[in-house]
Image: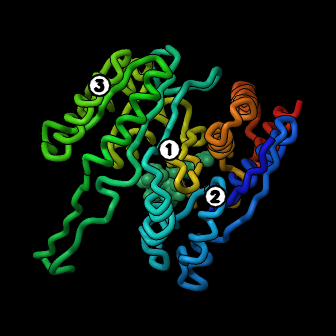
């Protein structure tokens, strides 16, 4: 039995729509597994920023830290909206949480779902997980602009890769590969990014002897995009840097049934701060307010959350319910966000 102090950050546009369904399913599954959900909602996001100028006050950060885990919807505005410049919420809220809470393992599983059409040639079952580094790389904001707005403008973004940061995520990926099918693929671009690529390749080679059961493979990121489409069943665990992982996981979502199904966890494996679970997708302003958002990715993120907190049976229950719901969609009329959430909640209690 456990009580879960859950911070919920619904966020913007479809964020609140899908988060409400994920919370509904969490609350539905909890009693049978002797789990109690104690949610606290935080109104961080575009509205609060536009009304107050606040993105993530230090006092709120401290409150969030005092939870077991965080469930996030999505943040961010319509790309190009002059009132909400791109990056304010993404960097100031989402990335700040990942950095402050040391979410160095950004876990993004991909699998095929029975009955879901994909753009792939083969229907071989897909089941891999991308272990995306979450605290370094091009995301740290180590850059600058000079002579802005002039023809001589110069902009830099420098990727940060520390041996410490690479080693800890690589070790986590090896351990996951050992517990799965024993295959680890490093994805990078070592033929061009020789400095960053050098440390990634060296660390993988150094750690490999500690995991003799794990077979190690390497792909340049451009070639990895080919195989993700032509032969995705070859992957078990992919370990990669922050930006490559971002791009590969949208692609992985698209080839396995769509962005509406892709779940993720921002995990702090050392448990020095709460981990945070969220769908891979963004706030999708174009479909907000119409009941069109698929809440399945958020619901499956809630399953990852339960797994992280040591409730694998409850997590399986959600995954099975979502998988059954997905399979039942073929040929059936489209449902609203709430209808899908209700159906999955009903299945977990059935
Ligand atoms: P997006 O993921 O929001 O949307 C991409 C496409 O996928 C759109 O066509 C959208 O309608 C569709 N889509 C997304 N989620 C869906 C769902 N659950 N069901 C059905 N269709 C869905 O990406 P974007 O358009 O590049 O970004 C929109 C905003 O979200 C931007 O402000 C961006 O910065 C932000 N963003 C936030 C997060 C996050 O909070 N984790 C992640 C990605 C993007
Ligand atoms: C994601 C998003 C974020 C990322 C953005 C919104 C900062 O695209 O979670 O995949 O790039 O990590
Ligand atoms: Mn992304």
Q: Position of residue 16 (x, y in %)?
A: 69, 60
Q: Residues within 10 Å of mark 2 (few under 14, many from 20)?
A: many
Q: Position of residue 346 (x, y in %)?
A: 86, 36
Query: What residue is pinned by disc 3?
Result: 208
| Viewer-side label of 2, 1 | 1
**Disc 3/disc 1 C-alpha distance (Å):** 20 Å
Q: Residue at x 65, y 46 (%)?
A: 298
Label 3 residue SS: helix
Query: What residue is pinned by disc 2?
Result: 15
**Disc 2/disc 3 C-alpha distance (Å):** 40 Å
Q: Residue at x 58, y 85 (%)?
A: 52
Q: Residue 338 bears which disc, if any?
A: none
Query: What residue is pinned by disc 1?
Result: 269
Q: Residue furthest bottom?
A: 52
2 or 3: tag closer to the N-terminus:
2
Q: Is residue 285 above or below residue 280?
A: below
């Amino acid at each position: 039995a456990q009580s879960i102090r859950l911070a919920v950050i619904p966020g913007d546009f479809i964020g609140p729509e899908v988060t409400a369904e994920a919370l509904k399913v969490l609350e539905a599954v909890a009693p049978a597994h002797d789990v109690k959900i104690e949610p606290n909602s935080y109104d961080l996001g575009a509205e609060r920023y536009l009304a107050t100028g606040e993105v993530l006050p230090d006092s709120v950060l401290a409150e969030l830290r005092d939870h077991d885990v965080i469930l996030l919807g999505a943040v961010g505005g319509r790309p190009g909206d002059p009132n909400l410049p791109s990056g304010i919420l993404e960097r100031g809220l989402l990335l700040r949480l990942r950095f402050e809470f040391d979410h160095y393992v950004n876990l993004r599983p991909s699998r095929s779902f029975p009955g879901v059409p994909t753009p792939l040639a083969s229907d071989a079952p897909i089941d891999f997980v991308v272990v995306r580094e979450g605290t370094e790389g091009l995301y740290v904001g180590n850059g600058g602009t000079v002579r802005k707005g002039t023809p001589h403008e110069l902009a830099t973004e420098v990727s940060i890769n520390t041996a410490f940061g690479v080693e800890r995520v690589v070790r986590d990926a090896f351990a996951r590969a050992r517990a799965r099918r024993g295959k680890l693929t490093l994805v990078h671009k070592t033929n061009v990014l020789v400095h960053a690529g050098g440390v990634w390749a060296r660390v993988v080679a150094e750690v490999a002897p500690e995991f003799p059961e794990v077979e190690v493979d390497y792909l340049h990121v451009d070639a990895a995009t080919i195989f993700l489409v032509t032969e995705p069943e070859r992957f078990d665990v992919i370990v990669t840097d922050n930006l490559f992982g971002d791009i590969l996981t949208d692609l992985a979502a698209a080839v396995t049934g769509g962005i509406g199904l892709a779940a993720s966890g921002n995990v702090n494996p050392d448990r020095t701060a709460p981990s945070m679970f969220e769908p891979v997708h963004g706030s999708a302003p174009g479909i907000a307010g119409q009941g069109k958002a698929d809440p399945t990715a958020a619901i499956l993120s809630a399953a990852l959350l339960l797994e992280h907190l040591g409730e694998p049976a409850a997590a399986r229950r959600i995954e099975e319910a979502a998988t059954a719901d997905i399979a039942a969609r073929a040929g059936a009329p489209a449902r609203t966000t709430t209808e899908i959430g209700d159906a999955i909640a009903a299945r977990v209690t059935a």
